[in-house]
Amino acid sequence: MDREEVLDIFRGTGALLEGHFELRSGLHSPAFFQCAKVLCYPRHASTLCGELVSRMRAELGADFEVDTVIAPAMGGIAVGHEVAKALDVRSIFAEKEDDKLVLRRFDIKEGERLVIAEDVVTRGGRVQEVIDIVESRGGIVAAIALLVDRSGGKASFDYNQFNLLEIEPVTYEAVGCPLCKKGLELVHPGS
């Protein structure tokens, strides 16, 4: 599956939006990936996450071992589930508590190998929070799997990272945003 095929799926489901958006990072952008709109179609979710797993396996080879996939809530849950399904392993998630991700419903065993799955990253803050959770519980980060890296490769981690789509859309700091200056309505679309 090439880049245009992936983009066609996003466009066809209305998951690639244009306008004036405030990202979770606080940056503003004229484009937004609303992955929930593509992930609500199980066939597309399975296809995209299956492709992501195929790329991981191709690069990491036969020695690649994983016990569990963990994702940050909310946006990453569907991605984590589909990646876990393709890997035939357990799927868990971290959730917000007082605006910080925590692991409440699940356990991580010492030495457990985990793939961290997320829908979209801009700066990588939520993925880093999950890395911190995994490491604090004695788990091992085996890889990071992202549907969309919208940082242009700037959000990087100390682990093998796989992106189905890497882009660097235009972003602006909130102060000085030309879209704000034009008076375009600011939308907070979520992930």
Image (cartoon, grey):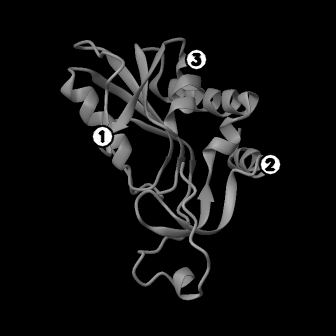
Q: How far apart are the two marked residues, 3 and 2, measured between alpha carbons?
A: 24 Å
Measured along the vertical axis of the image, is residue 100 above or below residue 110?
below
Residue 45, label in figure? none
Residue at 58% across, 17% down = 85
Q: Position of residue 101 (x, y in %)?
A: 32, 37
- The first of marks 3 and 2 along the sequence is 2
Q: What amino acid type is highlighted by mark number 1?
A: Glu
Q: Secondary structure at mark 3?
A: helix
Q: Secondary structure at mark 1?
A: helix
Crowd around label 3: few <14 · some 14–19 · many ≥20 (10 Å): some
- In the displayed structure image, the side of residue 28 where residue 113 appears, left or right: left
* 15 relative to 32, above or below: above
Residue hosting label 2: 12
Mark 1: few/some/many CA within 10 Å (<14, 14-19, 20+): some
The amino acid marked with disc number 2 is: Gly
Residue 61 point in image, percent of width and height: 48, 21
